[in-house]
Amino acid sequence: MNFKITVLPENRIITAEKNSCLSHVLTQNGISISAPCGGNGKCGKCKVKLIKASAGDLKPDSKGMIKSCKTVITEDLIIEIPNTLSNEISLWCSAERPPENAELGVALDIGTTTLAAALVDLERGTVYKKATCLNPQSIFGGDVLSRITACSNGNLLDLQKLILQKISDILNAFGSDNSLMLEEMTVAANTTMLHLLIGADPTPMGTYPFTPAFTDIKHIRGEELGLNVKKVTLLPSISAYIGADISSGILATNLQNAEDTALFVDVGTNGEMALSHKGKIYVSSTAAGP
C-alpha cells in the first residue's frame, strides 16, 4: 500500500510505501535533509513541518515540527521542509576544450561531507572542468561512525546507491552521457567512503580492532559500478582511519622525501596529520566535525 506525500514549498508529490521512514523516502526522491546524528532522533536537524496528516495520528511539537527520521509513514501527509540541502553540482569549465581523441580521466575526492572532482587530460595534465557537491550520504549521519552504524542496520546498499548516483551525475555534468568517453576515474577518499563506494561492509571498522575489508589499491571496470567510465581505480589506504586521501596527499606533497621536519594537515569532517621526521612518517586521525 502506498501513501501520498506532498512536499512544500515546491508542491511536489511523491509516493511512499506503508511503514517506510519519511527521511529515507525524501532522500530516495532526491530531497536531501540534514541528519548529522544518523537518524537516531537526537540532533533534531531533520525536522520538517507537518501541515496536514490524513489520519492525524502524528504528534508534532509545539512548533508543528516532526522528526523525519522517526516518522513512520502510515497515512497521506503534507509537509514543509524549512532547511533542505542543495543537491546541485557546482561546475567550473575552462575556456580550453579537450582536443579530439584526447584521453580523458577524472580525479575524484569523496569526502564525508563534500565531493570534489576534476576532468583531466591524462597525457597533458590539463584540467578542463571541476565539480563540487555535497555528499548525499549525510542523511545517514554526518560522520563515518554514523554511516558505519547505518550499515550495521542494513543500509549499506542504500549508502552505495546514493554515492554512485551522485558520481554518475558528476560524470554526466562533465559530458560522459554524450560522446565523451572517459578512460579512467581515480578515487581518493577515507577508508569508509571507499568501502561504501564498492559496497564492501565497513562495520568491522566500527569496533576494536578496527579491521577494514581492504586497504590495497583496487581496479574495477566502470560498468560493474554502473558508471560511464572504462576503469575505476581506488587508491590505497593506510589503515581503517587513515585513508587514500592521506596517502595520496603525502605523495602529492612529497612528504616522504622531506629533508626537514614537516607536517601535512588535512582538516575535514575527519582530521588527519602526517608528521615527517628523520626518514619516518607518523600519522594520526580524529573526528573534526561535522
Image: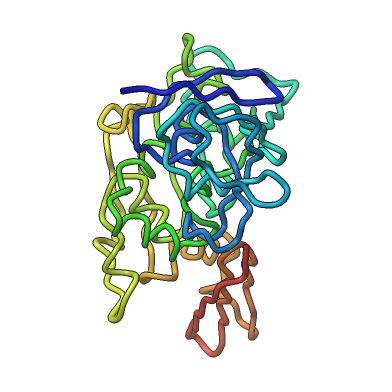
Residue 90 position in % (x across, y down): 69, 32
- Compared across the picture, whether 141 is left or right of 159 comes to right
- Compared across the picture, whether 49 is left or right of 192 comes to right
Residue 9 position in % (x across, y down): 71, 25
Residue 102 position in % (x across, y down): 50, 20
| Quarter of the view holding residue 184 | top left
Q: How is the image coloured?
A: rainbow
- Residue farthest toward the top in the current orientation of the protein: 179
Image quarter in which the C terminus is found: bottom right
Asked if residue 142 is positioned above or below residue 97 in the image, the reply reads below
Identify which residue, 257 or 20, lies in the foreground: 20
| Quarter of the view holding residue 228 | top left
Identify which residue, 196 or 176, lies in the foreground: 196
Residue at 36% over, 59% down: 236
Residue at 52% over, 29% down: 30
Residue at 61% over, 32% down: 87
Residue at 45% over, 62% down: 146
Identify which residue, 194 or 72, lies in the foreground: 72
Asked if residue 289 is positioned above or below residue 15 in the image, the reply reads below
Residue 22 position in % (x across, y down): 47, 38
Asked if residue 14 is positioned above or below residue 220 in the image, the reply reads above
- Compared across the picture, whether 229 is left or right of 273 comes to left
Identify which residue, 39 or 207, lies in the foreground: 39
Image quarter in which the N terminus is found: top left
Asked if residue 65 is positioned above or below residue 143 in the image, the reply reads above
